[in-house]
Amino acid sequence: MLESALETFARVGYRGASMEAIARAARISRPGLYFLFESKEALFREAVSHVLSSDLAAVEATLADDTMPFQDRLVAAFDRWAGRYVGPMVRDVPTVIADNPFLLDDVARAAPSRFADFVEAAVCREMTNGASVAQTLNSVSVGLIHQVATREEYLERLRVAVELLT
């Protein structure tokens, strides 16, 4: 339900998202949605926090998975963190957050730094210049999500960056 809510917010914007539309997307009744969340603000805050927490847990597990080659782990981690949001969500969600900063909780505010720390720790375990490589990969990812139209293009170009830098 929380992911359906976030997708609705991203698709129509925070102001354009009604509790009715979110309930429909989540396949529950509007009264049921209000039973779970007292307001649209509370729902947005919880949806963002939930998705970011899930993404961070998946990223941490992926980066620690020694059964995968190092470069594949990096690409998979960045894909989970940013690649799956390429397209309309990457343009709309930051706008919603910029327009409504009070909607974020501590989890959401800390998430980008936690992701960067996970990547840096993983790269430092593999390379002597890991901190610089991790920072550069983060910069590449941020740039790519604003330059490409599809997740596939994001992944293709990110793989090139990972190969060049590692």
Image (spheres, rainbow, N blue to C red):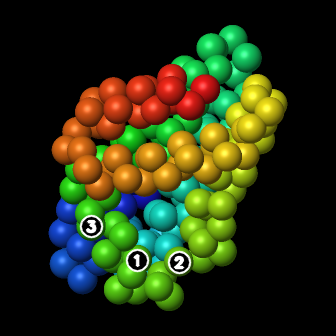
Question: Which of pointers 2 and 3 lies earlier in the amino acid sequence?
Answer: 3
Q: Residue at x 24, y 44 (%)?
A: 148
Tell me the residue at 67%/46% (across/down).
132
Measured as percent of width and height from the top left, residue 107 is found at: 64, 67
- In the image, residue 16 lies at what x, y percent? 19, 78
Given residues 31 and 126, the one toward you in this image is 126
Three-letter amino acid code at the position of disc 1: Ile
Mark drawn on residue 92: 3
Tag 2: residue type? Leu
Q: Quadrant of the rendered structure where residue 21 is?
A: bottom left
Label 1 with label 2: CB-CB less than 8 Å: yes
Residue 104 circle label? 2
Identify the residue at image location x=37%, y=42%.
84
Q: What secondary structure is marked by label 3?
A: helix
> Hey, which quadrant is residue 4 in on the image?
bottom left
Q: Is residue 18 above or below residue 145?
A: below
Mark nearer the N terminus (1 vs 3): 3
Question: Which is more toward the observer, 15 or 138?
Answer: 138
Figure quadrant of the C terminus: top right
Occupied quadrant, residue 30:
bottom left
Would residue 42 be visible to someone looking at this image?
A: yes
Q: Residue at x 56, y 31 (%)?
A: 165
Q: Is residue 26 visible?
A: no
Report the disc number at residue 97. Answer: 1
Cβ atoms under marks 1 and 3 closer than 8 Å? no
Where residue 157 appears, as percent x and y from the top left, is: 35, 32
